[in-house]
Image (cartoon, rainbow, N blue to C red):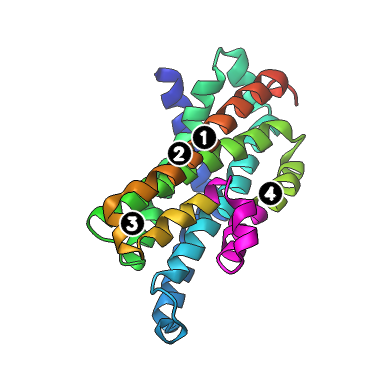
Amino acid sequence: MNSVKAVFKKQVKDTYKNMSVLIQFIIYPAVAFAMTALVDVSDMGMPNAIFTTMLASVFVGMALVPGVATIIAEDREKKSLRFLVMAGVKPSVYLLGVGGVTFIASLFPSIAFAFIGGFYGQKFWVFIAVMMSGVTASILLGSTIGIFAKNQQAATGLAMPIAMVLGFGPMIAGFNEQVARWFSPFYTQQLNVVIDNFNTVGDYQSGTSLWQPFAIMWANVVVLAVLFILTFAKKGLRG
């Protein structure tokens, strides 16, 4: 527990100093708010929360993956991770410390998205649950990329294409059924499925249609957790 606290405190200080990371937690809810307030989608036959749905999936997929990858790659490049491992810090402890900061920080924009989208009551809690499930998956994926990459530049170069696919793929899938089928195994697409379910009152009230997307999202989390542990075990001391 003391090791987790030490890594957590270290990451809080590092994140506070990194404005390029901090701005990610502000810009996406801000854009969602502006577009929701300025664009009238009622005449287009679209739900009022369409921009919240789009920007929430972009935030989870595109903002967090490169951010976490860069943070961990920086630790490796500066030898901080090597010293932590030599001090007996396990992969799970390091991930809890570094990922915990991102997880908690992501809760605030997630709450903002909920209010912007008009999700209250039970919908609010379902939205927060699905957002934080996606956040968990992105933290694991970003961590794996950060461990795998040689340096910060390589981490960014590797993470950005993956993040763009995860972030913008569900947006395209909303207009193309074939793309939606291709993206159905990915957690960002299932995040969209749950939020879109809010507009189908019968399905939402029954709750039966929520089990599958949550199951797929957490299958993603399990696979990514195993991938992170294997990558850390193989390359955690390199650099």
Say what amino acid the circle numbered 1 marks: Ala
Q: Is residue 62 magenta?
A: no
Sequence order check: which comes first, mark 4 or mark 2? Answer: 4
> Relative to residue 226, is residue 3 drawn left or right?
left
Closer to the eye: label 4 or 3: 3
Extent of the magenta region: 164-188
Pointers 2 and 1 in contact (CB under 8 A)?
A: yes
Q: Nearer the viewer, mark 3 or mark 1?
A: 3
Q: Residues within 10 Å of mark 1 (few under 14, many from 20)?
A: some
Return the residue nearer the eye: 224 or 182: 182
Whether residues under marks 4 and 3 lie with C-beta atoms below 8 angstroms apart, the answer is no
Residue at x 57% of width, y 59% of height? 170
Q: Is residue 149 visible?
A: yes
Residue 151 picture location, percent across and down:
75, 37
Query: For the residue marked with disc 3, what is the amino acid?
Result: Asp
Mark earlier in primary sequence (4, 1):
4
Marks 3 and 1, how far apart at CA: 22 Å
The residue to which callout 4 is attached is 162
In the image, taking residue 147 as reference, residue 203 lies left or right, namely: left
Is mark 3 in CB contact (under 8 Å) with mark 2? no
- Element class at badge 2: helix
Which residue lies under the disc numbered 2?
Answer: 215
Question: Which label sits on residue 203?
Answer: 3
Disc on the earlier residue, 3 or 1: 3
Q: Position of residue 20 (x, y in %)?
A: 58, 55
**153 relative to 10, above or below:** below
